[in-house]
Amino acid sequence: MKINPKTRHQDLAQHVKEQLGFISVEDVKSSVVVMVLIIYDVPLLLALLSIYKLEFLWIVSPFILILHLWAIRLLIKDPYSTQFEMVLFMGMWGSFGAISLFILIQGMSYYTLQITSLFYYIIMNVASIVLMYIYVRYQINKYAGDPTRERKRSNQSKYMGLLTASPAIGYILGQSMQETTVLKHVFATVVIYFFVILFMYIASKFLHRYFFIRANMDYVNYHPYSNKEKNKLKKQGMEIK
């Protein structure tokens, strides 16, 4: 992860510079609201209502509590002071989102779709582990080479089709002894599984970015205060250097 200290920042490849960058401070608060209240909460609520088992709410409640309290902190704090923290938040948001929704996928499969086939659960779990491994390996390999060399587009998408189709294949096999359940429940399960895939990708990308930035702090450029923000802080009595 460590870039050779002799390498100049202007010589870094574009994808490396992007990985050393932060989210725009103007977008932090709106991004936090959308990520937590919409992208995370909506599929979570859909899954919980589908299962209708209080036990699953208790299982995922630590993830829900941590993410929402952390989101409140980021909304209260000055976004200029949380630029690095925001990268970690996005990585953990992806991790917690993937874990909590994947737990609920198991519950939806068993209680809503009434799938009892062990083969289905083996296929789903193995496919998800392999997919997460591919994401992590991709992020590591992407930044492991010469940081000054521009990188060609990856063709990793060719592996995604089979892996994302694995739960559907397992479902068909698991239903070989019974009739197909209500279509809307099948659709909801597939949609939430795609959210799991999205969260896994975000987790691998931003957790790698967090540790990549930590290892190369000399190459990091924090977003400076805008003129509007400077005037606001000066009125509050803060000295801007």
Image: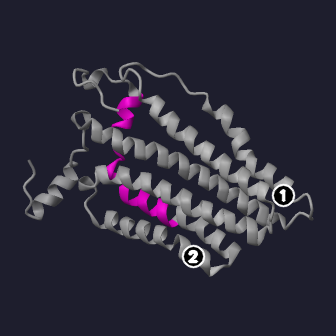
Q: Residues within 10 Å of mark 1 (few under 14, many from 20)?
A: some
Start and end of the magenta stretch? Answer: 15-37
Which numbered disc covers residue 57? 2
Q: Is residue 147 magenta?
A: no
Residue 108, percent across and down?
71, 67
Residue at position x 68%, y 64% from top? 106
Q: Secondary structure of the magenta portion, mostly?
A: helix
The numbered disc on residue 174 is 1
- Does the segment drawn in magenta span residue 28? yes
Residue 163: assigned label = none
Q: Is residue 203 above or below residue 47?
A: above
> Picture coordinates of residue 93 (x, y %)?
46, 57
User: What kind of element bears circle 2?
Assistant: helix
**Residue farthest to the bottom, as pictured:** 54
Left or right: 156, with 67 as reference point: right
For this rendering, which residue is in front, 122 or 6?
122
Residue type beneath disc 1: Gly
Tell me where residue 114 appears, x and y as whole percent: 80, 69
What separation in Å lies between label 1 and label 2 (alpha carbons)? 26 Å
The answer to which quarter of the image holds residue 146 is top left
How many numbered marks have been drawn onto this rendered protein structure? Answer: 2
